[in-house]
Amino acid sequence: MPLSRRSFHRLAALSAAAGAGALAAPRAALAANTAYVFAYFTETPNMSGANYGLHLAVSTDGLNWAPLNQNNPVVTPTAGTLGLRDPFVFRKQDGTFVVLATDLNGTDFGQNNQYLHVWDSTNLTSFTGYRRVRMHTLNTHTWAPTAFWDAARGQYGIVYSANNGTDVFMVNYTSDFRTVSANQVYFSPGFPVLDGDVVVDGSTFYLYYKNLTTGLLYGARSSTGAANSYTTYTGGLRQGDAMEAPLLVRNNEGNGWRLWGDSFSPVNNDFYAWSQSNVGANSWTALNQRDYTPPLNAKHGSIAGISAAEYSALVSRWGLPNWVRLKSSNLPDRYVRHANNLGRIDAYPFDPHQDQLWRMVAGLADSSGVSFESVNYPGRFLRHLNYEIRLDANDNTATFRADATFTRVAGLADGAWSSFRSYNVPDRYLRHLNYALRIDPVTDATARADATFRVTS
């Protein structure tokens, strides 16, 4: 994980108006949004999982995400630094998409770049018209782009983080995301800011940002969306110990909003989330991490609403993961993994990140059950031995097959989740105890919670 962005001029993050909120009259002619797409790049604490191409994940509820293309990039820049950060996926007035991204490959935040990467896409199953668009001639960075439709101007605004002596947001206007107007300062409140996300709701423009002085996230609003017309209306928000990249998303159902923030701490969850029913209020409520699962290794992304047909096309084109993760119900920042050939739950993120990836296959002893094969150690399975869960090579004995087989049942603490009963010791369930995995009888509420997991991506 890179050092604090503050140490490197504070790296920008991407944000995203969930395309839905930024569309005007032509929106009514489009199919209703029933799902979501998440665009991001990837990093892990020791950077072994870092990839600076465009990654996509999908979700039907906007909370729990399935990476596409096995969490590999779907497109990679071919010019500039040959890498991207902070990808922003935005639905244009004609219903197609544009993708903007910071031109930065890796963590060398000291370099300055006047360009953004740009692609066009009909439905995110392919990407055309790749180009780099020059946003200014200043000796500064061009980080964390966001875009919005300004109906009064009849143009799109592209807002990004830059520095003109202090950290500010710049804006350029465009009709085609190819040629842009001269840059101008868009938001400079008297203290340094980073990672702006602009969303239009009706006649109100909302700008969420990070105050670099306090390290907190804030929301501002304007009735015109004009440069330097915003007034901050929320208190500061933070979860964890380090946060940036506010990401404001209107629910597809139209009955509420979510705000995401990206943690750049190597010991914290990568994303945190809040919700509230009225975006104009100052009443954000932190969501329990049980309620959401960000894409694996995702960093600084954006979210857009998509239709059912677009969701199906993305899944058909790129494919859903061929692995699963098991998320603890009562310690939801922790996932089942193997370490030193023992099963345990650890707080995510960690490396090797593949230690938490499993092929959930038909039970080795009974095909109606399930077994868990390690992705990074094929042929090794979770099994119990003296009630302790281990990762061992399948020796194809009847004992091993039985020890490695579990019956999946409704979650003992939450029926929407899952619990796993031992096949050959059926009064015992897979559970964690002091973070170690074992099989035990379940006799109280604590054990039921310990034995409940979400099967996720």
Image (cartoon, helix red, strand yellow):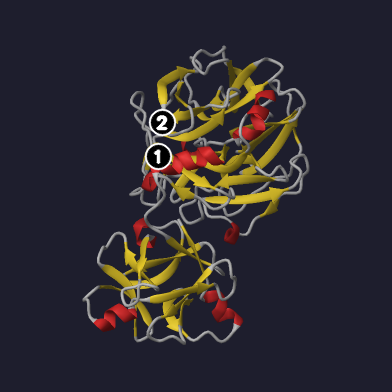
Where residue 390 sits, quadrant-wise, is bottom left
Circle 1 sits in a helix, a strand or a loop, which is it?
Answer: helix
Relative to the observer, which residue lies in front, 367 or 435?
367
The Cα atoms of the two marked residues, 2 and 1, are separated by 9 Å
Q: Amino acid at mark 1?
A: Arg
Q: Nearer the viewer, mark 2 or mark 1?
A: 1
Residue 63 appears in view: yes
Q: Which residue is located at x 68 percent, y 40 percent?
A: 218
Q: Amino acid at mark 2?
A: Ser
Vertical relation: 60 (above or below) 343: above
Residue 230, percent from left and from top? 73, 28
Residue 171, percent from left and from top? 60, 21
Evaluate if marks 2 and 1 touch, with contact meaning CB atoms under 8 Å apart. Answer: yes
Q: Which residue is located at x 48 percent, y 14 percent?
A: 137
| Residue identifier under label 2 | 126
Where residue 254 sits, quadrant-wise, is top right
Vertical relation: 191 (above or below) 275: above
Mark 2 or mark 1: name the one nearer the start of the chain.
2
Circle 2 sits in a helix, a strand or a loop, which is it?
Answer: loop
Residue 7, percent from left and from top? 48, 39
| Residue identifier under label 1 | 317
Vertical relation: 299 (above or below) 154: below
Q: Which residue is located at x 24 percent, y 73 percent?
A: 394
Residue 246 shown left or right of residue 377 in the figure: right
Q: Which quarter of the rendered picture does the C terminus lie within? A: bottom left
Where residue 256 sits, quadrant-wise, is top right
